[in-house]
């Protein structure tokens, strides 16, 4: 893979599509994370370093000892029988399976969701019926608490230089220390009215003392007017989503209907509880006393790589500073590190959620001897069926042995443990790297993609040790599912884009934008604001290219319209793209045909070799990005859009289901089709949480009023 380089242009310092990799940094017994700039792929250079004093060593932690909780256990499901419920966010502590050097189990302080003062990580599960509304009062019970996550010296990791809740106009005098942590809950995948969708500017502080500029109601009524699906809920407060979710703010939200009832007599014969399981997979770092750890300061893992090593000068020279991505070195399932469960030799249905910040996983299941804690003696991967994804069942089951699993997504699978003998351990393997995902995995990656002494290649284990019950096991692998795609006629083709530039401090800044001049729902041009600093920056006329969150809305579908979106990814890595409100059909992918005067290291023209394009393909030009504080960063605009060959369907990507997440691969155009059937203010964003917190999110306004 070619590496990115940062070079100087003909007129002073000009950001080009490249990145020079520096020395890698220390991690707790491991190293490895990458940042991205347009355009070329590159990989993390990981090298073993001494263990940082104060951090948990993942290699020293037990594997497959703790029993994993099932998020669909009846005792873990909220009682919503009255049609309304109060759910709060508050402090708690849990044993995750971490132990100290003497083997004593450690407690991890958390902020979780719960009712009646019982907060958990993950939050307890909602299970609702399609078409039956539920009223949820979300309560912020983080009163008089400092921010939970700190560095090794006890300093808060919140970066207040970002465009975040308390940096908005009129909110600058507020702080977490004085006013509490802002939160807002988003039901991810929910077909929700905009004012209860959990958009980032709808945040509120403890006791609703401070309310975001878009805040409207205390009671969120979810109509649940959608087919059965595996949704989830998590915090979405502006600029601190990555941190609030990291504290424990996430849980499952299942919709059931007459087809997918969740009961043993469901029409499709799908496995039901206790043979239906729900697992939220996340990655974390911990201090050696059990507390959560998140890097944000000079001397922390990843700081040299993203800040000093790349010449950035953040507003707080020693931190805290947001870093471009996060890859944890401990794998966690439903709040337990590397857990296990005991199963029968039969079919199990598993709902899998990728709740990681930045990590793409690539899943396989491999048999191993009972008691194995790694994959050294594991057998060949075992096949399983993918029967659904984000918002419901697929059109038909797909048998695979490898599955790409993007952040924010959910996959619904059926695994038959009768494939292996009694007394076998089946390990859920992760072939993905400890670095940004570019489409390669497994044998196509090199040692530079992985943490040394890597423990993240395994997630959890299933011990085939239980006698068969008398419950029938007749999963119909040939069932015909309800999803038939989006067959509505297309009202508009929209061209959006994924960029990565630099903020005003020289830090990597992922951005969204357009690949065409912006127009509103009536087709009228959307222009750059006729005001400073846009005028001085030369941003005039129709909006186009990279755009920060606070600038005018450019995605403005007409109400009840169906749009086909082309997502142009001109960055070096894959991004998991999420649209609120809708589900969409993934139509396919196509290569970007680049201009001959660009290179894999540099898609910008002029560059070190050419001042002008050859005229036979796509290229980028630099343009300023107006930041929330009025200063300027650097972004790009796509020129001469040119389409290359179609990309064949890939076996490891199963997408024949209603999706709200799509993997937009580098150097490709990804096509989706969605119908926008509720009016108002929604958002679309990259679901790498560190990216959405640093401007890779934009307002999407349906109908008039944007």
Image: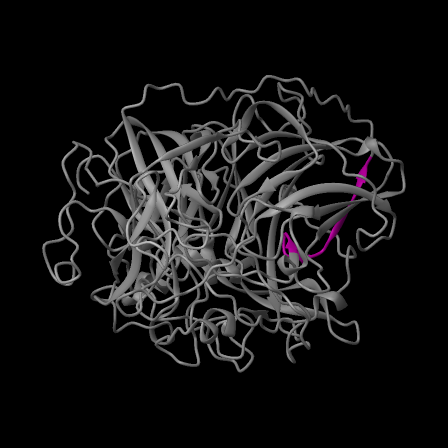
Q: Is residue 78 visible?
A: no
Residue situated in front as seen by the camera: 455 or 333: 455
Indicate the position of residue 458 as horizontal and vertical percent values: 72, 52
| Residue 581, quarter of picture | top left
The quadrant of the rendering that contains the C terminus is: top left
Compare residues 57 and 83 and report the one nearer the observer: 57
Q: Quadrant of residue 626?
A: bottom left
Q: Would you say 418 lies left or right of 360 here?
A: right
Horizontal and vertical percent for residue 528?
Answer: 16, 50
Residue 495 is a magenta residue: no
Q: Nearer the viewer, residue 452 or 270?
A: 452
What residue is shown at x 31% (from left), y 63% (from top)? 163
Q: Residue furthest left?
A: 530
**Is residue 501 depicted above or below 144 in this figure?**
above
User: What residue appears at the point 89 percent right and 36 percent down from the top-left corner?
Assistant: 421
Q: Main secondary structure of the magenta part?
A: strand
Q: Is residue 74 visible?
A: yes
Give the number of callouts: 0
**Residue 673 at x, y percent in the picture:** 38, 28
The magenta stretch is 332-344
Display coloring? one colour
Residue 276: x %, y % from top left: 67, 35
Residue in view at x 47 percent, y 39 percent: 662
Q: Give whichever of 453, 219 is nearer the camera.
A: 453
Q: Please say if 191 is above or below 452.
A: above
* Magenta stretch holds residue 334: yes
Side of 555 relative to 207 (left or right): left
């Amino acid at each position: 893979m070619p590496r990115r380089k940062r070079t100087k242009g003909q007129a002073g310092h000009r950001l080009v599509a490249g990145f020079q990799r520096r020395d890698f940094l220390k991690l707790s017994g491991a190293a490895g994370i990458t940042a991205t700039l347009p355009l070329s792929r590159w990989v993390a250079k990981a090298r073993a370093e001494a263990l940082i004093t104060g951090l948990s060593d993942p290699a020293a932690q037990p594997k497959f000892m703790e029993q994993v909780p099932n998020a669909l256990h009846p005792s873990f499901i909220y009682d919503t029988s009255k049609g309304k419920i109060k759910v709060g966010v508050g402090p708690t502590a849990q044993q995750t399976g971490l132990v100290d050097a003497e083997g004593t189990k450690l407690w991890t302080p958390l902020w979780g969701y719960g009712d009646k003062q019982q907060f958990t990580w993950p939050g307890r599960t909602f299970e609702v019926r399609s078409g039956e509304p539920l009223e949820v009062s979300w309560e912020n019970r983080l009163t008089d608490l400092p921010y939970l996550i700190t560095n090794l010296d006890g300093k808060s990791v919140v970066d207040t230089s970002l465009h975040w809740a308390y940096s908005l106009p009129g909110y600058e005098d507020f702080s977490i220390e004085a006013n509490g942590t802002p939160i807002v809950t988003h039901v991810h995948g929910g077909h929700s009215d905009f004012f209860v969708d959990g958009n980032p500017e709808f945040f509120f502080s403890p006791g609703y003392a401070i309310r975001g500029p878009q805040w409207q109601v205390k009671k969120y009524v979810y109509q649940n007017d959608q087919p059965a699906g595996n949704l989830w809920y998590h915090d979405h407060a502006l600029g601190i989503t990555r941190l609030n979710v990291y504290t424990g703010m996430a849980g499952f939200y299942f919709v059931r209907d007459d087809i997918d009832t969740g009961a043993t007599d469901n029409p499709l014969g799908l496995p039901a509880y206790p043979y239906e399981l729900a697992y939220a997979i996340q990655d974390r770092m911990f201090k050696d006393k059990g507390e959560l750890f998140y890097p944000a300061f000079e001397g922390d893992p990843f700081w040299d790589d993203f800040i000093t090593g790349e010449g950035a000068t953040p507003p707080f020279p020693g931190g805290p500073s947001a870093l471009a991505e996060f890859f944890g070195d401990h794998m966690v399932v439903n709040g337990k590190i590397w857990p296990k469960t005991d199963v029968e030799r039969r079919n199990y249905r598993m709902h899998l959620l990728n709740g990681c910040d930045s990590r793409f996983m690539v899943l396989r299941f491999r048999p191993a001897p009972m008691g194995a804690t790694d994959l050294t003696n594991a057998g060949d991967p075992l096949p399983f069926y993918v029967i659904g994804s984000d918002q419901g069942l697929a059109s038909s089951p797909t048998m695979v042995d490898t599955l790409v699993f993007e952040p924010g997504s959910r996959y619904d699978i059926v695994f038959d443990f009768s494939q292996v003998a009694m007394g076998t351990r089946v390990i859920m393997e992760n072939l993905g790297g400890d670095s940004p995902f570019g489409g390669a995995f497994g044998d196509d990656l090199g040692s530079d993609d992985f943490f040394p002494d890597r423990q993240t290649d395994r997630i959890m284990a299933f011990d085939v040790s239980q006698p068969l019950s008398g419950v029938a096991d007749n999963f119909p692998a040939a069932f015909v599912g309800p999803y038939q795609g989006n067959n509505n006629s297309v009202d508009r083709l929209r061209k959006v884009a994924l960029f990565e530039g630099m903020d005003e401090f020289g830090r990597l800044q992922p951005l969204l934008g357009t690949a065409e001049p912006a127009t509103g729902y009536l087709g009228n041009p959307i222009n750059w604001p006729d005001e400073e600093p846009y005028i001085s920056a030369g941003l005039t006329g129709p909006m186009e290219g990279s755009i920060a969150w606070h600038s005018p809305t450019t995605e403005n579908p007409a109400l009840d319209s169906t749009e086909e979106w082309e997502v142009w990814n001109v960055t070096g890595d894959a991004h998991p793209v999420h649209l609120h409100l809708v589900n969409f059909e993934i139509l396919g992918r196509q290569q970007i045909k680049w201009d001959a005067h660009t290179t894999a290291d540099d898609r910008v023209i002029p560059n070190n070799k050419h001042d002008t394009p050859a005229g036979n393909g796509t290229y980028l030009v630099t343009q300023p990005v107006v930041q929330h504080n009025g200063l300027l960063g650097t972004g790009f605009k796509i020129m001469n859009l040119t389409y290359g060959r179609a990309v064949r369907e890939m076996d490891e990507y199963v997408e024949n289901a209603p999706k709200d997440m799509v993997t937009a691969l580098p150097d490709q155009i990804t096509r989706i089709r969605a119908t926008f059937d509720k009016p108002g203010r929604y958002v679309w964003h990259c679901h790498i949480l560190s990216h959405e917190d640093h401007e890779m999110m934009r307002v999407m306004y349906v109908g008039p009023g944007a």
